[in-house]
Image: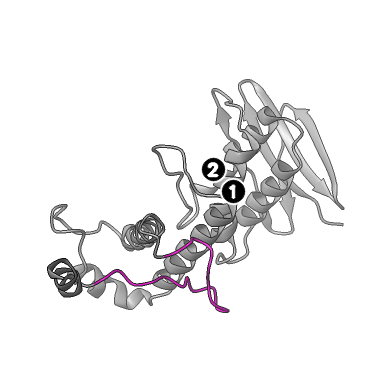
């Protein structure tokens, strides 16, 4: 009989989230540890303040996590993230939903390539567009991350940040994050310029985007 446990400490209280044969339970505990065979999973997250998370924000943030999770190897930490996603989907209040999101973010911060939340103005994209963009971004990141370790130092020595930024990437993960960000920026730009609707992809999930005009074409158009 398999049970997955996730422990979250909120202020001076420890909450245990468990999923056992589809039954979601929440218990208040003082201490908790879980072990399965030789593996041990213990997660403790300190939450100084819980901010209520509306369903729209939950969907927007978790879409990125779900897309990222599809390309991750199986692990106890990944199981804990997936469990928190399920429980958050079924949460009855914004406060409880924010608790699960804090758990996801805290566990994910220890995992390679976990997508960070973007800061700035509120997105104008639909939920469907957000999901498409998140899926494409994580597919790009996963493809770059699969470059063999023995080739990464060579790549880091010649592929560097934008000229105005200077320096080099501190790690291969930083380079991966950069390509994820570039993919996002290009897709947003394509939507704003009406070269893509943010939804259309081919059977392999590749976005069908009309290329931006090359500079020579733009100059000819202006002369006409």
Q: Quadrant of residue 221?
A: bottom left
- Is residue 150 rendered to the left or right of residue 112? left
Please identify the quadrant where the N terminus is shown.
bottom right
Taking 68 as reference, is 219 above or below it? below
Q: CA distance from mark 2 to mark 1?
A: 10 Å
Q: Nearer the viewer, residue 183 or 34?
A: 183
- Which residue matches tag 2? 105
Q: Quadrant of residue 171?
A: bottom left
Does the magenta run of residues contain 139? no
Number of numbered discs: 2
Could you tell me which residue is drawn at 59 percent across and 48 percent down?
62
Say which element carries label 1: helix
Q: How far from the left and from the top, in percent, is residue 47?
A: 56, 28
Say which element carries label 2: helix
Q: Nearer the viewer, residue 151 or 126?
A: 126
Could you tell me which residue is drawn at 32 percent across and 63 percent down?
172
Q: Contact, CB < 8 Å: mark 2 with mark 1?
A: no
- Which residue matches tag 1? 62
Please identify the quadrant where the C terminus is shown.
bottom left
Could you tell me which residue is drawn at 74 percent across and 37 percent down?
91
Q: Residue furthest front?
A: 224
- Is residue 3 rendered to the left or right of residue 76? right
| Mark with earlier residue (2, 1) | 1
Provide the residue span drawn in magenta.
196-213
- Is residue 106 rendered to the left or right of residue 159? right
Crowdedness of circle 2 by 10 Å Cα count: few (<14), some, many (20+)?
Answer: some
Q: How far from the left and from the top, in percent, is residue 184?
A: 40, 57
């Amino acid at each position: 009989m398999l049970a997955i446990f996730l422990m979250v400490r909120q202020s001076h209280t420890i909450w245990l989230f468990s999923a056992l044969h589809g039954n979601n339970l929440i218990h208040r505990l003082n201490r908790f540890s879980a072990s399965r065979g030789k593996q041990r999973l213990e997660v403790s997250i300190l939450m100084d303040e819980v901010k209520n998370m509306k369903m729209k924000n939950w969907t927007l943030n978790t879409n990125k996590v779900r897309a990222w999770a599809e390309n991750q190897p199986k692990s106890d930490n990944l199981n804990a993230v997936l469990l928190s996603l399920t429980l958050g989907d079924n949460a009855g209040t914004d406060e409880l939903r924010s608790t699960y999101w804090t758990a996801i973010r805290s566990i994910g911060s220890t995992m390679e390539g976990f997508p960070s939340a973007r800061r700035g103005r509120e997105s104008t994209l639909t939920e469907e567009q957000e999901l498409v963009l998140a899926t494409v971004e994580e597919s790009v990141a996963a493809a770059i991350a699969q470059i063999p370790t023995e080739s990464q130092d060579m790549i880091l020595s010649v592929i560097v940040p934008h000229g105005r930024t200077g320096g080099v990437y501190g790690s291969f993960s930083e380079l991966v994050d950069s390509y994820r960000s570039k993919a996002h920026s290009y897709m947003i730009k394509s939507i704003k310029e009406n070269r893509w609707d943010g939804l259309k992809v081919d059977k392999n999930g590749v976005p069908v985007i009309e290329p931006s005009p090359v500079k020579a074409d733009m100059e000819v158009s202006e002369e006409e």
